Image (spheres, coloured by chain):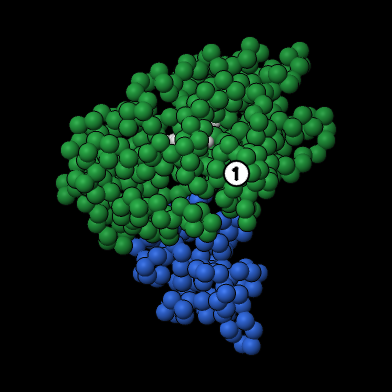
Amino acid sequence: MATLEMAGTSLELDDDGFLVNRDEWSREVAEELAKADDISLTDRHWEVIEFVRGWYAEKDESPTLRRITKVGGIPTKELYQLFPEGPGKKVARIAGTPKPEGCV
Amino acid sequence: MKKLLILGGGTAGTMVANRLGRELDAEEWQITLVDQDPIHYYQPGFVFVPFGIYKKREEVIKPRKGLFTPNVRFILSDIDLIEPDKNQVRLKKNDTTLSYDFLIIATGTSIQPEETPGLLGDEWHKSIFDFYTADGAFALAHKLRTWEGGHLVLNIVDTPIKCPVAPLEFIFLADWFLHEQGLRDKVEITFATPLPEVFTKPRASAFLGNLLEERRINVETEYLIEEADQEKKVIRSFDGREVPFDLLVTIPLNMGSGVIERSEMGDDLNYVPTEKHTLKHKTFENIFVLGDATDLPTSKAGSVAHFQTESFIHNFLRYIDGMELLPTFDGHSNCYIETGYGKGTLIDFNYDVEPLPGKFPLPGFGPFSLLEESRVDHWGKLMFRWIYWHLLLKGKELPIPVRMSMAGKRL
Ligand SMILES: Cc1cc2nc3c(=O)[nH]c(=O)nc-3n(C[C@H](O)[C@H](O)[C@H](O)COP(=O)(O)OP(=O)(O)OC[C@H]3O[C@@H](n4cnc5c(N)ncnc54)[C@H](O)[C@@H]3O)c2cc1C
């Protein structure tokens, strides 16, 4: 199983690079997870991440991109720029929320 | 006399009305159900319509008024407004106001093609179709009968959608249908989904993942449609990917009922905030939400509505006697997936357990197979229509456990 090594601890990741134990998420962990996607987090990224985490805390699932736009106020096109190629999955991974899923 | 009011008489509303019609004392309880539509649609049948498996409207509809037990009063009307602070609901018909002691919201979800630019317009039901409505499904059947081939694109506008497996079933059935017509070599099929993968759950992708490759289906993932361009005959995503189509089958944005929005009781998609394990409204103590109308992280499906109804009834009968609600709903879902060529498969899962392979409902014996293609599962799906009208809607017991069981599943 893959791991994320940081500051002397090692965090377990699943096959898609998501934290196995979501409680281990922190801002520092997010920075590290983003590095794997060649993203360095700006204030705008953090706005998205905070919205996603807030939504997850309330609804028990990651918000869709449409919801990040409609409810969180960040235009969809910008999401594709902030988290290029597959923002849906990348945002969730970096924010430490579950992978967007269907039922199969 | 206590008043129980049920909003929506689809799968969930009808089941719960008929179950409570039997359970509650008619001397003490008045049960009223309101729906705007005189017709009850058997929506799972819509998947079969485009391919001529069901040919006539009578095969997927019934008049609604004959579907309730005698002590359920049915009112045909648009519901205008829910006023939970006053314990009352306003109807459009004759400006009626209905008061209630307990309210059940079961107003479902429906497609909103107008939310995506370019879906509606001249090409709607000419080269752009939905199959989530009876009209769409029959129009598509008509088109497919004379279609000569080209690029068939199936696009899901966004999740959540009701019956999340229906788009996949459509693709599998289309592949089979076109093969039977001798057209398969003249058709390219593309599946464009907003999700990161078609199969997002590990065990399901291990067992079903290669089905798409075998059937030569192109896949576009994380595809969020911005517009359909009717002139150029392409759909365009927010990140600029253009997919050309000759025949576009869309699953438009699904949204909860307009009355939820008017009453300011929903989220951005008009789904009602609901307690995950008890199905009670998150704020109001005398409101429950069943079926597709909830904001719960489980599938929007008839089977889920059934399991919800069963666990709700048990709880409600306690609740009205002053006992607390038990956290009995586990998110259980059970769906047949048609895979074409006379076969199908079955998935069974809940909030915490992903679909696993095995046998259902009897361990080792089945007769249904989980996550494996089988002929019996296809017959199960066809038989389901009879079960729907004659057992499910009438609120009769089904031989399947309400809570998900691990028996028969392989880890
Ligand atoms: C193509 C397709 C295939 C499907 N296949 C399957 C399957 O194989 N298995 C499965 O389990 N499920 C399947 N489903 C899903 C299933 O049909 C739904 O999940 C189920 O019907 C939900 O029940 P419900 O009562 O919540 O909503 P519905 O049955 O949709 O009922 C909602 C009712 O509320 C009424 N209503 C809404 N707003 C108002 C208003 N303002 N005033 C008055 N009345 C109102 C509507 O008229 C409607 O009758 C499928 C659905 C589709 C579209």
Mark 1, Cα crowd under 10 Å, few <14 / some 14-19 / many 20+, is many
**Apparent colour of chain B:** green
Q: Position of residue B233 (x, y in %)?
A: 19, 47
Specify the quadrant of the image occupied by residue B404: top right
Q: Residue furthest front?
A: B365
Identify the residue shown where x is 31% and y is 62%.
B239
Q: Position of residue A53 (x, y in %)?
A: 57, 64
Say what amino acid the circle numbered 1 marks: Lys
Q: Can residue A69 be seen by looking at this rendering?
A: no
Q: Is residue B354 visible?
A: yes
| Residue drawn where x is 46% and y is 18% of the image | B62
Q: Position of residue A27 (x, y in %)?
A: 58, 76
The residue positioned 70% from the left and 18% from the top of the image is B22
The residue positioned 50% from the left and 37% from the top of the image is: B377
In which image quadrant can residue B317 be found?
Answer: top right
Q: Secondary structure at mark 1?
A: strand
Quadrant including the N terminus of chain B: top right
Work out which residue is located at the far right of the displayed protein and give it: B322
- State the residue in front, B288 or B85: B288
Asked whether, in this view, residue B94 is left or right of residue B316, the answer is left
A8 in relation to B357, above or below? below
Chain identity of mark 1? B
Task: Look at chain A in the picture and name its colour.
Answer: blue
**Nearer to us in this view, B273 or B175:** B175
Identify residue for label 1: B359
In the picture, measured across the screen, residue B340 lies left or right of residue B293, that is left
